[in-house]
Image: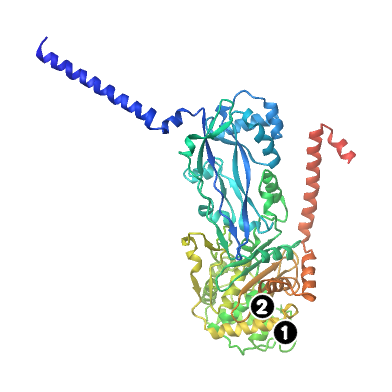
């Protein structure tokens, strides 16, 4: 053999030996050194279990847990691992029939495939979990996964905390698959706004099962496990006892309460009535209960405090007074002679007060809520420049600076913007040059096209109480370990043009409201309180009752707005409710005697519009009919026979 051929043979042999050595070393590494792949190779014996984190706890201003966590269990299934089993026994343990079993298995395969775990039965009641836990080893492919669920110790504030729901395909896709099937996500309220900090981080545990599907322990002593990281806690400005009192005072009424700390913008209470117990929206019955709330004619899921828009009525007058003073169209001593009517626009406009002296100056006009006075000064504001459109633009700019006509930016979603009409609005309605200050004069008393949310009314009171500034209203004072989310709520919004002396004049009028004016009947002994009653016309029924206030007059600690729909004069229901809320917050109790009697009377009074009473009766009849139908199906009896037997 040629010397050259012998050399070539040796080279080829060395190449083969080197390749075999590399393969051998790689196999040794994969099978002996790198145990990660051993885990994958033993997938039949080792199961990957998701450990869901505990959501952050929500505390009120005094450190009381208002949203906490309980532990329930989801029953999950990996369809490809389901083997022959006693399906009837399984269904009996779970309380379902075989048709439901097949439907759920099909849904699991469609949603998440055959080899990935899917939720077969969410949030099992404790008695069902107990039965399954003892027998789960008999049903390969099924597993019980602990699921932290929300608990609400005070049974109130449902529209504040918000709802949590399992992430559906659209949420998963929008999150770029950050969420997975089985994850729960905040969809309304604080749960939605602060979802990134409340949710925490999922963990993974690997457990070893024997041939009988029984858990034998952690794989590799937990070497590859990752711990779930709990969500961060929220600490609120809200006072949960004040919140509970507000919901009790508005029971069997339609309306809302918003109380704010004017020095910080922190929400002290936010009540929307009708309300609901948020505990009904946790656990296995949450879907059924949610649908009942959706069908409720009182719309308890509609947060009237931030979503309902009302004409503010006479609660708007202090803001108009500030504009008139700042524009120089009146002085504090300016007065008119009101005899119960305003004739300045060629038609009779009524005033509820008409005794001598009730409109002698600005303070008296605020104290006794003289409509004629505020018709007159509104027209002066609009007309004083000689151009009605410019006058309305200037007036609108003030209102926007006061926080009206736009969202304030509260830290729960769904806030409405309210409405402050502008020139384009009136040009569309009346045509250019076909309207004047008389056409829109009702805006002077908070009627016409003006709409405010209760939150905006309360924020306007904060502006007055602070002599010209407010902070964006918000619930969360602190997120454990994270302050970046809260920066917008520390920004002071200042209305710089209006001098402090003008605020003092308006505040003096609001103090007179409580001393001798329209709110005098609900003043709190020993406390100097400033307020303004309001009665808003309602085209759909009886007028709405409104009231706004802050207290104490010096260094105020609370500002509040109350709206009670279809309740008439502001002094009749809204003012007493606000007065009780202020007393509770500042004194931590309601005084015995007349004050306690007033509280009980407010709690026990029912004020519901006729349309709602009719709708509630119709719903009761529909629910009874549905119950009869369901009972008939369960017993296989004719519906007519079942009804007759009741």
Horizontal side of 14 relative to 195 (left or right) equals: left
**What residue is at 47 percent from the left and 28 percent from the top?**
42
Residue positioned most to the front: 221
Indicate the quadrant where residue 238 lies. Answer: bottom right
Residue 614 point in image, percent of width and height: 79, 55
Residue 28 point in image, percent of width and height: 35, 27
* Disc 1/disc 2 C-alpha distance (Å): 11 Å
* Disc sitting over residue 363 in the figure: none
Examine the rendered structure and indicate whether residue 73 appears above or below residue 473.
Answer: above
Of 184 and 590, nearer the camera is 590
Horizontal side of 41 relative to 182 (left or right) equals: left
Indicate the quadrant where residue 511 lies. Answer: bottom right
Q: Circle 2: is it few (<14), some (14-19), or many (20+) Cα within 10 Å?
A: many
Residue 492 point in image, percent of width and height: 49, 72
Q: Secondary structure at mark 1?
A: loop
Of 124 and 429, nearer the camera is 124
Examine the rendered structure and indicate whether residue 206 appears above or below residue 259.
Answer: above
Does the CB distance between marks 1 and 2 fall below 8 Å? no
Q: Which residue in the protein does label 1 denote?
A: 516
Residue positioned most to the left: 3
Examine the rendered structure and indicate whether residue 483 appears above or below residue 403.
Answer: above
Q: Circle 1: is it few (<14), some (14-19), or many (20+) Cα within 10 Å?
A: some
Q: Which residue in the protein does label 2 denote?
A: 531
Q: Secondary structure at mark 2?
A: strand
């Amino acid at each position: 053999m040629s010397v050259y051929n012998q050399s070539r043979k040796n080279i080829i042999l060395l190449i083969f030996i080197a390749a075999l050595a590399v393969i051998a070393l790689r196999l040794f590494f994969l099978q002996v050194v790198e145990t990660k792949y051993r885990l994958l190779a033993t997938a039949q014996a080792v199961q990957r279990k998701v450990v869901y984190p505990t959501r952050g706890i929500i505390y009120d201003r005094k450190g009381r847990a208002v949203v906490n966590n309980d532990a329930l269990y989801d029953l999950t299934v990996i369809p490809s691992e389901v083997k022959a089993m006693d399906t009837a026994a399984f269904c009996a343990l779970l309380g379902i029939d075989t048709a439901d079993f097949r439907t759920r298995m099909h849904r699991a395969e469609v949603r998440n495939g055959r080899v990935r775990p899917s939720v077969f039965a969410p949030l099992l009641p404790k008695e069902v979990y107990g039965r399954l836990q003892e027998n789960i080893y008999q049903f390969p492919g099924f597993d019980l996964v602990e699921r932290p669920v929300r608990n609400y110790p005070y049974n109130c504030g449902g529209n504040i905390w918000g709802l949590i729901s399992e992430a559906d395909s659209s949420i998963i896709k929008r999150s770029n698959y950050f969420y997975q099937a089985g994850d729960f996500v905040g969809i309304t309220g604080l749960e939605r706004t602060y979802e990134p900090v409340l949710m925490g981080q999922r963990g993974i545990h690997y457990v070893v099962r024997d041939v009988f599907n029984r858990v034998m322990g952690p794989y590799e002593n937990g070497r590859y496990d990752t711990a779930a990281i709990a969500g961060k806690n929220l600490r609120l400005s809200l006072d949960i006892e004040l919140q509970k009192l507000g919901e009790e005072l508005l029971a069997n009424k339609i309306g809302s309460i918003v109380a704010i700390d004017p020095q910080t913008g922190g929400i002290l209470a936010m009540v929307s009535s009708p309300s609901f117990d948020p505990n009904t929206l946790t656990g296995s019955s949450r879907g059924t209960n949610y649908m009942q709330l959706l069908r409720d004619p009182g719309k308890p899921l509609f947060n009237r405090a931030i979503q309902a828009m009302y004409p503010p009525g006479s609660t708007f007058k202090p803001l108009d007074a500030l504009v008139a003073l700042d524009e120089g169209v009146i002085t504090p001593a300016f007065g008119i002679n009101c005899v119960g009517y305003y004739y300045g626009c060629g038609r009779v406009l009524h005033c509820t007060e008409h005794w001598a002296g009730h409109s002698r100056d600005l303070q008296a006009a605020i104290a006794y809520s003289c409509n004629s006075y505020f018709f007159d000064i509104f027209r002066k504001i609009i007309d004083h420049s000689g151009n009605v459109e410019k006058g309305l633009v200037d007036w609108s700019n003030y209102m926007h600076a006061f926080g009206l006509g736009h969202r304030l930016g509260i830290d729960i979603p769904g806030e409405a913007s309210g409405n402050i009409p502008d020139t384009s609005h009136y040009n569309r309605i009346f045509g250019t040059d076909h309207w004047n200050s008389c056409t829109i004069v009702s805006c002077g008393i908070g009627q016409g096209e003006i709409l405010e949310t209760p939150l905006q009314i309360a924020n306007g009171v904060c502006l007055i109480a602070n002599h010209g500034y407010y902070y964006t209203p918000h619930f969360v004072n602190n997120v454990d370990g994270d302050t970046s989310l809260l920066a917008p709520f520390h920004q002071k919004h200042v209305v710089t043009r209006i001098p402090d002396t003008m605020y003092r004049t308006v505040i003096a009028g609001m103090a007179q409201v409580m001393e001798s004016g329209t709110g005098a009947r609900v003043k709190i002994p020993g406390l100097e309180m400033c307020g303004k009653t309001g009665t808003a016309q309602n085209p759909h029924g009886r007028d709405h009752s409104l009231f706004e206030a802050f207290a104490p007059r010096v260094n105020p600690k609370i500002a509040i707005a109350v709206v009670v729909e279809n309740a008439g004069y502001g002094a009749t229901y809204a003012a007493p409710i606000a007065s009780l809320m202020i007393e509770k917050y500042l004194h931590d109790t309601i005084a015995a005697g007349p004050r306690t009697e007033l509280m009980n009377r407010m709690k026990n009074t029912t004020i519901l519009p006729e349309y709602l009473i009719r709708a509630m009766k119709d719903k009761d009849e529909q629910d009874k009919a549905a119950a009869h139908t369901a009972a008939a199906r369960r017993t296989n009896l004719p519906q007519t026979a079942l009804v007759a037997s009741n």
